[in-house]
Amino acid sequence: MEPVVLVFVVAALVGVPGLVLWRVLQGRRDLGSTRAERATFETLHTASLAAPPLRAGLTAAGALKSSRHLRELLGSPAIAITDSEQLLVYDGAGDHHAAEAFGHAANTLKDGRTQVLGPDVVACDVPECLIRYAVVVPLTTDDRVVGSLAAYGDHASAGLVRATQEVARWVDSQLELAELDRSRTLLMEAEVRALRAQISPHFIYNSLTTIASFVRTDPERARELLIEFADFTRYSFRRHGEFTTLAEELRSIDRYLMLERARFGDQLQVTLRIAPEVLPVALPFLCLQPLVENAVRHGLESKDGVGRITIIAEDAGSECHISVEDDGIGMDPERLRRILSGDSDERSGTGGVGLGNVDERLRQVYGDEYGLVVETGRGAGTKVNVRLPKYHPGVSVR
């Protein structure tokens, strides 16, 4: 292998930025840059193919899908991947060695050290078999040994040991990202549960009381409201999917407002202005509904006379801009700042769970620049502004 090609292979495995690698190439034209560039592309492309299955964690399905690409990175006749309890996949030549692969990894799984196994352990009685040596390297996440990667072949050079260790380190990084993804998902699920807990007791009690008031005087109206209530709770308590569409969220909000208008009568006036172009936009589940509920509960319930809520969703090029505004009693800006900054005492109070939770979820999904922007003041009403990218990696309604 040419020196510059080796630089690219190793650098690609440990994550050196492409621009740095390109500059190395630019300064080494005399070493055959075309071949080096091709080797770099092939290495990075192979790594990119191996990455997605590993982002689901160390599973049999993920190991099977990524094994061929990992074997190409190592240039070995065969590789084996295990978790801490079993062989996940054996890929390549000499598949009759698969039955022994987990045993080959036993010491590495136990002490977390790289093992080089010779013919006395690995070799078989098949004359044409290429498998005589194995380099077994631990796979770790959070300093815990969670599995192993073994490269099998007819030799075990120092270069193969280093390469296997580097590939294993790259696999570790993918597994750590998988853990972060899982933690993020669990956190978002916990936050959604917190929102559901906030919605259910207050709203369910008031809705059922309102419906009960119509049972004798207007049974048909009571029936309609009961159906809307059932549809609203079915949506709010559903268990599938982190994301929904703006159309679905607005449909649930409309049911909520129908129930609240039945309760408040003419005292609650609602204006919606929705651009049709943004209805298919995906957004975190229960992202807007808590903002509307806050507008009703904390903006209007304590206000005398008519209360007005305005919901606007506009097409803004690559983004969707949404605002929920009320002319209620408003909020102390300093208290709002504490809620959005994560003050646990404020978040546990009235209104804190909704605003703080939605703000945190938006930042987790889209980045800090997409947090809530709130305009409020005592006696001045409240306007909550939300920006959403129309398309964002990982955000889709499945």
Image (cartoon, helix red, strand yellow):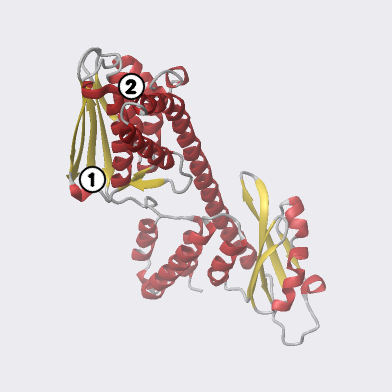
Residue at 33 percent across and 19 percent down: it is 336
Please say if 209 is above or below 320: above
Residue 167, quarter of picture: bottom right
Badge 1 marks a residue whose secondary structure is strand
Q: Nearer the viewer, mark 1 or mark 2?
A: 2
Q: Position of residue 174 (x, y in %)?
A: 53, 54
Q: Between residue 284 and residue 69, name the one nearer to us.
A: 284
Q: Residue furthest bottom?
A: 128
The residue wearing badge 2 is 297
Label 1 amino acid? Glu
Distance CA(mark 1)–CA(mark 2): 29 Å
The answer to whether residue 369 is seen in the rendering is no
The number of callouts visible is 2
Give the image quarter of residue 252: top left
Q: Position of residue 208 (x, y in %)?
A: 41, 28
Q: Secondary structure at mark 2?
A: helix
**Residue 319, numbered label:** 1
Q: Is 390 situated left or right of 66 in this image?
A: left
The residue lying toward the viewer, choosing from 120 and 372, is: 372
Q: Nearer the viewer, residue 225 or 80?
A: 225
**Callout 2 crowding tier (Cα within 10 Å): few <14, some 14–19, many ≥20:** some
Q: Earlier in the sequence, mark 1 or mark 2?
A: 2
Name the residue rendered at 28%, 49% in the picture.
281
